[in-house]
Image (cartoon, grey):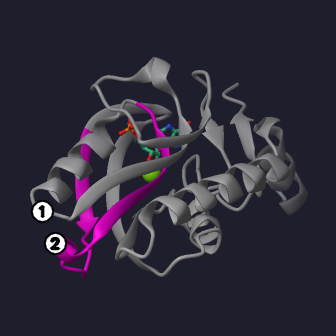
């Protein structure tokens, strides 16, 4: 395959934009304000789960107008194609002692709910001052474990989506919008 063909193939998998850059920006401004208003000066640690949430984290933290610290952890959920097969593994842990913080977990998408359920249980065991979950996207129709985010910016149907940090086989994270992936 030459360069043009591989770029064409790459683009042909972007079926259609479902959430635009402007819509994402507006929702994040609103969420940032809500978070800034409700924590009034208490010590906040934003924790993002890599890699998918890195873009959302970068924009959300800049919409928060009160002091906050940032931490990262890496959790891998295993996929066979675009279908989750269940196991979640922490491959990189936080460096902070979270018992000193009000933790806000920042996630890209909740699908089966397994990743966040596991990560939340792990973090709760470390006794944070409080723990809340903010997710950019939520696919409630696909839940396998009962899990609800405290703040969810967009609810979407059962599409496999790419862009704004979300990947398919590590590609498409750099798209500035959320698109439906063309599985054909
Ligand atoms: P869960 O454990 O099934 O809730 O899956 C959560 C993780 O699977 C997310 O953090 C994503 O990394 C990935 N994921 C779930 N749905 C999608 C999707 O539609 N596009 C890309 N990644 C997804
Ligand atoms: Mg993720």
Mark 1 crowdedness (10 Å alpha carbons): few <14, some 14-19, many ≥20: some
Q: In the image, what residue occupies the spot 66% across and 56% down?
A: 28
User: Which numbered disc, 1 or 2, marks the residue that appears first in the sequence?
Assistant: 2
Mark 2 crowdedness (10 Å alpha carbons): few <14, some 14-19, many ≥20: some
Residue 12 is situated, as x and y percent measured from the top left of the image, at: 83, 39
Q: Is residue 39 above or below residue 113?
A: below
Q: Quadrant of the C terminus?
A: top right
The residue tagged 2 is: 99
Residue 70 is situated, as x and y percent measured from the top left of the image, at: 42, 77
Residue 112 is situated, as x and y percent measured from the top left of the image, at: 37, 30
Rendered image: mark on residue 127? 1
Q: In the image, what residue occupies the spot 34% across and 43% down?
A: 78
Residue 110 visible (yes or no): yes
Residue at the far left: name it.
125
Q: Are marks 1 and 2 in contact (CB under 8 Å)?
A: yes
User: In the image shown, does 69 or 74 lie closer to the viewer?
Assistant: 69
Disc 1 to disc 2, how far (Cα)?
Answer: 5 Å
Is residue 159 highlighted in magenta?
no
Magenta stretch: give its range: 87-111
Residue at the far top: name it.
141
Q: Is residue 130 above or below residue 180?
A: below
Q: Is residue 37 left or right of residue 184?
A: left
Q: In the image, what residue occupies the spot 47% across and 24% down?
A: 140
Q: Is residue 82 left or right of residue 16?
A: left
Q: Is mark 1 within 8 Å of ligand 1?
A: no
Q: Is mark 2 within 8 Å of ligand 2?
A: no
């Amino acid at each position: 395959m030459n360069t043009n063909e591989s770029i064409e193939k790459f683009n042909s998998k972007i079926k259609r934009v479902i959430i635009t850059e402007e819509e994402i920006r507006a929702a994040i401004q609103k969420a940032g304000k809500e978070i800034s208003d409700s924590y009034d000066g208490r010590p906040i640690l934003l924790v993002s789960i890599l890699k998918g949430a890195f873009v959302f984290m970068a924009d959300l933290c800049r919409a928060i107008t009160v002091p906050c610290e940032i931490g990262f952890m890496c959790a891998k959920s295993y996929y066979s194609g675009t279908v989750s097969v269940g196991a979640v593994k922490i491959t990189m842990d936080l460096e902070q002692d979270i018992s000193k913080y009000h933790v806000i977990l920042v996630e890209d998408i909740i699908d089966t709910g397994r990743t966040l359920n596991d990560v939340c249980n792990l973090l709760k065991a470390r006794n944070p001052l409080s723990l809340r979950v903010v997710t950019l996207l939520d696919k409630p129709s696909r839940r396998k474990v009962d899990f609800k985010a405290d703040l969810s910016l967009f609810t979407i149907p059962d599409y496999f989506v790419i862009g704004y940090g979300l990947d398919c086989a590590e590609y498409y994270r750099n798209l500035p919008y959320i698109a439906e992936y063309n599985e054909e």
